Image (tube, rainbow, N blue to C red):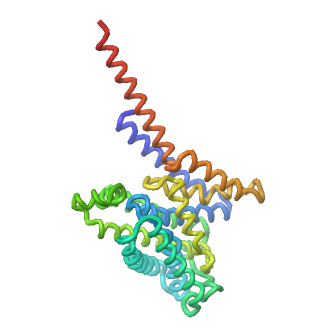
Amino acid sequence: MSEAARTRLNYAGVAIALAFLILAPLEFHRYGIYILSQWAVMTIAAIGLNLTLGYAGQVSLAQGAFVGIGAYCAAILTTQGWPLIAAIALALVLCFVIGWLLGYPALRVQHHYLAFVTLAFSTLAFLVFRNESWLTNGTEGIDGVPRPTVLGLSTTPHLYYYYFCLFMLALVTLATLGLVRSPWGRAFIALRENPLRALSLGVDTRRYILMAFAIGSALGGLAGALYAPLVGLVEPPAFTLTLSLNLLMMVIVGGSGYFLGPFLGGLVAVLLPEWLRVVDNYYLILYALLVMGLLIYSPTGLIGIVDRFLVDRRTRAASAARAAASASIERP
């Protein structure tokens, strides 16, 4: 397949996916629209984690904590009459700064040691959410988080808020695509593949490690700020380590380091359990078995399966072309 044909096929796939995401919810019931909205929100958080883990190679178990920080920013401000855009701005700045600071341990420790550092931060954030009642209302949480009004149109109906979340996901997708295709993105990949080689080539690894954590954390905060009006109630149990592990699973199952990985991983983590509810009490067991089977078959995730198929196809095509050329040369 030529490069032009491959590009047209990619554009066609994007157009079909967009048409489905825009038109399909028109036929969904209220709960189905809520699940799609949750997918859009959690995909934003997974995109941030994919930048930190998949592109920069820095392990983080704190993404759920940043979602919680963003959610509490939205809950506290919007229930006091502030617009959601102000809460989003605060969540982005606050999570960016905290993520930058959290990146400093990554300058000294790596791999599972770094995972323990981010795990400690996630635990600390949960304790703040639960115990600092003067700020977070403790275990009772903050109820009645309002949904925003955009261009004079209220997003209180589930369908309208879904489209708002989808629009924010589209903005994040375009911004992230520009980032990974820029010299920043190439520096992240060089940092992931071989930090010493990247340093020898003049890449400021210190700055890029901090930036990877900061940008990924900021996207987690953005997802949290969108999550709060979606559910209406922000409480500590929603932001335990389980959320961070689910986001990590989304990135790995979709394909860590692949741009579309978080999108497919979100489908698996958010939608698949709902589709499996037809088996009643066994749906979580079946869900776990399917995920384990996938990772055993393809450790690089769903995108890795497609990528391996395309590589094998190109290899067979190249081998056939060489065999044909060799036969034409040997023919008298």
Instruction: Note whether residue 248 is visible.
Output: yes
Residue at 42% across / 72% down in the picture?
Answer: 218
Q: Residue 275: percent from the left, percent from the top?
A: 68, 54
Residue at image point 56% right, 66% down: 245
- Residue 28: x and y, percent? 65, 58
Of the 4 image quadrants, the one containing the N terminus is top left
Q: Residue at x 60, y 59 (%)?
A: 269
| Above or below for 177 versus 307 | below
Image quadrant holding the C terminus, namely top left
Nearest to the observer: residue 146 or residue 66: 66
Q: Is residue 89 visible?
A: no
Relative height, residue 161 to residue 332 (above, below): below
- Most extreme residue toward the right, as rendered? 280
Question: Is residue 297 left or right of 314 when viewed as pictured?
Answer: right
Q: Quadrant of residue 146?
A: bottom right
Nearest the viewer among 101 and 80 is 101
**In the displayed image of the protein, which residue is found farthest to the bottom?**
134
Please state the total of marks drawn on the protein image.
Answer: 0
Is 274 or 52 nearer to us in this picture? 52
Quadrant in which residue 129 is drawn: bottom right
Taking the spot 43% from the left edge, 62% from the top edge, the residue there is 53
Q: Nearer the viewer, residue 269 or 14?
A: 269
Query: Which of the 4 image quadrants contains residue 216?
Result: bottom left
Apparent side of residue 211 relative to residue 297 in the rendered image (left or right)? left
Residue 70 rendering spot, x and y as whole percentages: 49, 77
Q: Position of residue 301 (x, y in %)?
A: 52, 50
Q: Residue furthest top?
A: 332
Left-right relation of 279 to 267: right
